[in-house]
């Protein structure tokens, strides 16, 4: 039952800890403890402590997840939640698309209304509400941030 | 802090812009607090980037207005739909909702406003009286003591873990690791920047907060959305029942106020303990008041006195949390964690300097808290009945608005596209943390205090030429070290004790059977 309980957060913690350790080991300037360094503690000391702690926490979480043996399932999927998860995924994708389009075009106030429109449609709002909300929200943000605070929104 | 300094700070605040931003903050706070799912922390995190474009006094006016109003407005939903707008309003639901059902909704809303104001004022008074003497102690602090204070703050990651100690520790260390991204504070070596210039300054705290508490919360609410339940709740929110009178009578005020003053003082003390937030304060004060009151049996069944005590305790923590934040640099709760980040971004260091070099601004912050309380008292009473209409706003509307504001807010802090990426990544992480039942508080604490711990600890080691005994030979540092050990060991001992008690009770049950 590796997919259940605390196993996945445990693996995540282990992965981050091991990655940090590898980064420290492969970077010779990331000294952990060295008498030749002033104060005896180098730039790698704190990351090393964190990596070690994350690995220990990761192991404990994985063990707990295995011991839970499927009795704890955080992603308890009902048909409704499965649909909702798709919406969550789509919203994350829309944000990524907004960020990419903004980066490529540099035209934030063209990308933003398209994003707001798309999110409203994703959340099944009526066309009339979507159009009104998109126009209102974009205008509010433009007036407050672009005109009021002179933010240029350059990626 | 002398009366003259405070009076002159007060006079300096008498500007139209301060009142304007204070009113904006109060209105936003009322809106945020009254909408279930939006917390004061989320509101402060979202609005903070905007305040960097204002002068610091106007910015803090907005933040103080928002924070104070959001805490009191959490009681509106608790009273009208039995859903606390903030966790701290839980006890207000126990007494406020039965009052509303009895047709005393207006009075319940009035009590919420008036006694939140009283609680807020008591805690600010104590803040003004006590902050300066506490800050005077910090003049003796060197890097060793500051490292220990920050480490003590970090031990609170266990306290804010809500019983999930292992998960809290894991996230705390992850936050600490994130705080090491950027240039090393002592050697200047680039760590975990992967050649990116925009990571050299480290990971900004505010985008992390916006991502975790804003976008992450929105994603989780979408995931957990139940259309039928939402429709039922919307129906319940369409307030049709007459709300009745709003203001308590003079006799009622006389009867409830002494008990509420005691609650206000207790709440301030609880608020000053790092990580003991409004929810703990409200429950402790409400529980003790129930035990000691003549009408204790009515508590939880529509007691106006119980509601008054809860409202006082709820806003009473604010002054205590600010006291710890301003004097020691330890956030008393999640909101003060964001405020601490704001202070640091304005180039200020909490501690003794806030009461010497920055004393004028510190006095202005305190005066702004007084004004914020007066503002929400006036606006709250004037709009008590109208505020019920706020609850008709649908969740999807809130999600779209908050999602867009998360993107814009995270960009505005440094005009940095990278900050938006950080916010997005943290939003996704925040979503999974909620799904896997992880408390996000420890991550925030680790990121916020990690830099202070590392910088001061390594500076202390440089001063002592690598002698770790430096931390135990200095009295204040040693005392703090004992406190750190106690705060680590106490929850562990408590957990073992509870486990043993449970086993014992289980054994007794078996014998009885």
Image (cartoon, rainbow, N blue to C red):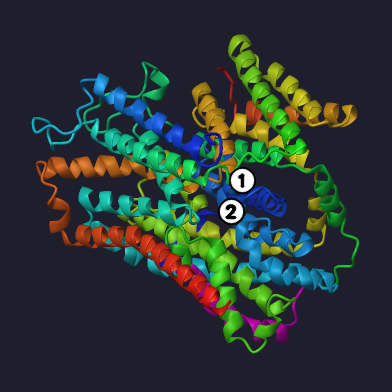
The residue indicated by pointer 2 is B67
Q: Which residue is mark 1?
A: B43
Dot 2 crowding, Cα within 10 Å, few <14, some 14–19, many 20+: many
Return the mark for residue B158: none
Q: Disc 2 versus disc 1: distance between alpha carbons? A: 8 Å
Q: Position of residue B37 (x, y in %)?
A: 68, 48
Query: Percent position (x, y) of residue B8?
Result: 46, 60
Q: Main secondary structure of the magenta part?
A: helix
Left or right of B306 in this view: B415: left
Name the N-terminal-most of marks 2 and 1.
1
Between B206 and B178, the one nearer to me in the picture: B178
Marks 2 and 1 in Cβ contact (< 8 Å): yes
Q: Which residues are magenta?
A: B246-269
The image quadrant of residue B397 is: top right
In the drawing, does residue B3 fall left or right of residue B381? Answer: left
Q: Chain of mark 2?
A: B
Residue B350: x and y in percent read 36, 51
The residue located at (53%, 43%) in the rendering is A69
């Amino acid at each position: 039952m590796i997919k259940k309980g605390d196993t996945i957060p445990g693996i995540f913690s282990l992965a981050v800890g091991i990655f940090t350790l590898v980064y420290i080991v492969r970077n010779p300037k990331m000294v952990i403890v060295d008498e030749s360094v002033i104060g005896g503690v180098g730039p790698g000391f704190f990351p090393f402590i964190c990596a070690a702690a994350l690995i220990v926490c990761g192991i404990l979480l994985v063990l707990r997840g295995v011991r839970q043996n499927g009795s704890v399932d955080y992603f308890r999927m009902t048909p409704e939640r499965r649909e909702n998860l798709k919406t969550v995924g789509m919203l994350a994708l829309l944000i990524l698309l907004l960020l990419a389009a903004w980066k490529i075009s540099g035209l934030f106030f063209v990308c933003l209304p398209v994003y707001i429109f798309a999110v409203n449609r994703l959340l099944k709002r009526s066309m009339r509400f979507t159009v009104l909300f998109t126009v209102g929200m974009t205008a509010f943000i433009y007036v407050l941030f672009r005109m009021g605070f002179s933010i240029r929104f350059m990626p | 802090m002398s009366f003259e300094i405070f009076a002159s700070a007060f006079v300096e605040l008498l500007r139209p812009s301060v009142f304007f931003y204070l009113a904006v903050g109060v209105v936003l706070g009322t809106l945020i607090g009254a909408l279930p799912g939006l917390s004061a922390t989320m509101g402060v995190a979202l609005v903070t980037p905007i305040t960097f474009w204002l002068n610091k006094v106007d910015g803090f006016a907005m933040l103080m207005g928002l924070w104070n109003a959001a805490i009191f407005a959490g009681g509106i939903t608790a009273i009208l739909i039995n859903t606390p707008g903030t966790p701290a309003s839980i006890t207000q639901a126990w007494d406020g909702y039965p009052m509303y059902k009895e047709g005393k909704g207006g009075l319940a809303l009035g009590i919420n406003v008036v006694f939140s104001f009283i609680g807020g004022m008591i805690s600010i008074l104590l803040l003004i009286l006590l902050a300066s003497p506490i800050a005077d102690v910090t003049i003796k602090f060197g890097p060793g003591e500051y490292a220990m204070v920050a480490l003590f703050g970090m031990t609170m990651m266990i306290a804010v873990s809500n019983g999930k100690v292992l998960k809290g520790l894991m996230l705390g260390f992850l936050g600490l690791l994130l705080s090491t991204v950027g240039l090393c504070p002592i050697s200047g070596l680039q760590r975990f920047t992967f050649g990116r210039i925009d990571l050299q300054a480290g990971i900004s705290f505010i985008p992390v907060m916006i991502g975790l508490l804003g976008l992450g919360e929105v994603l989780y609410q979408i995931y957990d959305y139940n259309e039928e339940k939402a429709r039922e709740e919307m129906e319940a929110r369409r307030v049709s029942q007459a709300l009745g009178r709003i203001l308590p009578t003079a006799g009622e005020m006389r009867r409830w106020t002494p008990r509420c003053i005691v609650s206000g003082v207790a709440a301030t003390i609880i608020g000053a303990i790092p990580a003991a937030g409004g929810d703990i304060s409200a429950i402790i004060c409400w529980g003790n008041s129930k035990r000691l009151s003549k009408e204790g049996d009515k508590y939880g069944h529509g007691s106006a006195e119980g509601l008054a005590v809860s409202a006082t305790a709820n806003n009473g923590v604010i002054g205590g949390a600010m006291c710890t934040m301003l004097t020691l640099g330890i956030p008393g709760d999640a909101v003060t964690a964001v405020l601490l980040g704001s202070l640091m971004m304005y180039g200020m260091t909490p501690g003794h300097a806030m009461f010497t070099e920055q004393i004028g601004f510190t006095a202005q912050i305190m005066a702004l808290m007084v004004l914020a309380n007066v503002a929400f008292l006036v606006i709250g009473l004037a709009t008590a009945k109208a505020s019920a209409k706020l609850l008709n706003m649908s969740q999807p509307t809130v999600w779209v608005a908050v999602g867009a504001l998360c993107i814009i807010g995270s960009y505005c802090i440094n005009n940095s596209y990278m900050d938006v990426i950080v916010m997005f990544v943290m939003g996704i992480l925040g979503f999974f943390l909620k799904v896997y039942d992880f408390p996000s508080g420890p991550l925030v604490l680790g990121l916020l205090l990690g830099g202070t711990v590392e910088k001061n600890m390594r500076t202390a080691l440089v001063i002592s030429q690598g002698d770790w005994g430096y931390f135990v030979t200095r009295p204040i540092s040693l005392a703090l070290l004992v406190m750190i050990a106690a705060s680590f060991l106490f929850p562990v001992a408590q957990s073992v004790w509870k486990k043993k008690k449970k086993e014992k009770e289980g054994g007794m049950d078996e014998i009885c059977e």
